[in-house]
Image (tube, rainbow, N blue to C red):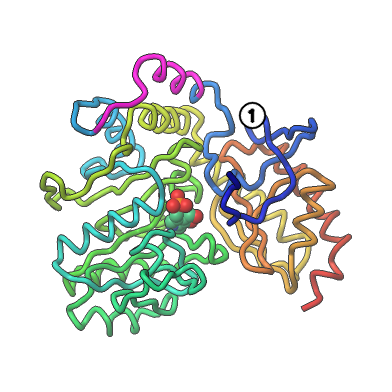
Amino acid sequence: MKLFDVYPLFNITPVKASGCYVWDSEGNKYLDLYGGHAVISIGHSHPHYVSMISRQLNEIGFYSNSIQNPLQQELADKLGNISGYPDYQLFLCNSGAEANENAIKLASFVTGRKKFISFRKGFHGRTSAAVALTDNPKIIAPVNETGNAIILPFNDLEAVEAELKTGEIAAVIIEGIQGIGGINIPEPEFLESLGTLTNKYGGLLILDEIQSGYGRSGRFFAHQYTSVKPDIITVAKGMGNGFPIGGAMIRPDIKPWPGMLGTTFGGNHLACAAGIAVLDVMEEEKLIRHSEDIGNYLMEELSTISSEIQIRGKGLMIGLEFPGPVSGLRKKLLFESKIFTGVSGNNIIRLLPPLTLNKDEATYFLKVFAKTFQEVSASLNAN
Ligand SMILES: Cc1ncc(COP(=O)(O)O)c(C=O)c1O
């Protein structure tokens, strides 16, 4: 059987990884400034993570959600404490899209409403409600087209209030920092006002922290640079350091009923072991603070390379926007210097390294990046 060919692939076959490094089948060693798309939070194959998952697998890897699994509560307690939301409730699932899908469904159940607001350049996943609220018509199939999704300009509070006033909006969904859209940070006052206005008009606020959460921004959640308190927060990516796990953190007074949400695999023993190991390491190695410090160092140094590069970001979620296409720069970094980076659109490089990236690794990247930028700067200006 052939694989369904939906991914443009680099001809690289990773076979081993450790910390911020990945090795391919030819023995080449790569520095990972992409973290497998913002997924690797505590570093590849962290020994504590490997030992927790291995030990769990030797005991019990999976049973259904019809039995007691104390690991779910252990994970919820740890996540509540480290995130500053100890009184919220956790629904566990398997991916980012599923976390958003459940958050959207929950907001609709709670309010009895059908319409949702999201923002231009936003990305919330590829399942039905999540993709309808994603600003990319190419990935919205006819079955996902709905009049219930209203996509508004980013940071436009008036537009949001005009829609909320109709009394038909179940929730507003927004990323803590837009990731796939090119590292766009919502204005703090905008985010805070979304909290006030959704509350005023009887809707909910869903913060999609799937990419920007779990310490990536230098806070546990990117929205914690502001005073907003969302009704639902969605998490995935860094939560399992590569093990598929996602979740929705839900305001304490929202009442569940049996069967309201559900999943076969969500919250299984192995996923919980992975999730607990991630939080252990984040705490032990103080990775949230570290992410802020190394991120600031990277952004300060990057800003000295060229005034043509626009730098946006917080912590280790950094976007570098160039006046022209970056594919040459990215390929040169990858194939000549063996450094993984991400992109957004044609002109933006995204840096999403493991949160364990140390100063020497960051300095090495900066040196190589500055040199490579000089070599390709003519093509970067070709608009
Ligand atoms: C902000 C955001 N939301 C949702 C998703 C979807 O997550 P998943 O690919 O795990 O379904 C992503 C994935 O990139 C994302 O960046």
**Quadrant into which the N terminus falls:** top right
Residue for point 15% across, 61% down: 110
The number of callouts visible is 1
Q: As drawn, is 235 to the left or to the right of 34? A: left
Describe the element under mark 1 as helix, strand or loop.
strand
Q: Position of residue 136 (x, y in %)?
A: 49, 71
Q: Read off the magenta span.
A: 50-64
Residue for point 15% across, 66% down: 111
Q: Residues within 10 Å of mark 1 (few under 14, many from 20)?
A: few
Determine the image quadrant of residue 274.
top left
* Residue 212 in view, yes or no: no
Residue for point 46% across, 33% down: 282
**Quadrant into which the C terminus falls:** bottom right
Residue for point 28% across, 61% down: 104
Residue assigned mark 1:
18
Q: As drawn, is 55 to the left or to the right of 314? A: left
* Residue 119 in view, yes or no: yes
- Considering every residue shown, the one lying at the far front of the view is 1
Residue at mark 1: C-beta within 8 A of ligand 1: no
Q: Position of residue 24 (x, y in %)?
A: 73, 35
> Which residue type carries mark 1?
Ser
Q: Is residue 150 magenta?
A: no
Q: Main secondary structure of the magenta part?
A: helix
Front residue (pair 36, 3): 3
Front residue (pair 10, 87): 10
Q: Is residue 205 above or below residue 146?
A: above
Q: Position of residue 158 (x, y in %)?
A: 33, 84
Front residue (pair 351, 262): 262
Determine the image quadrant of residue 134.
bottom left
- Considering every residue shown, the one lying at the far right of the view is 375
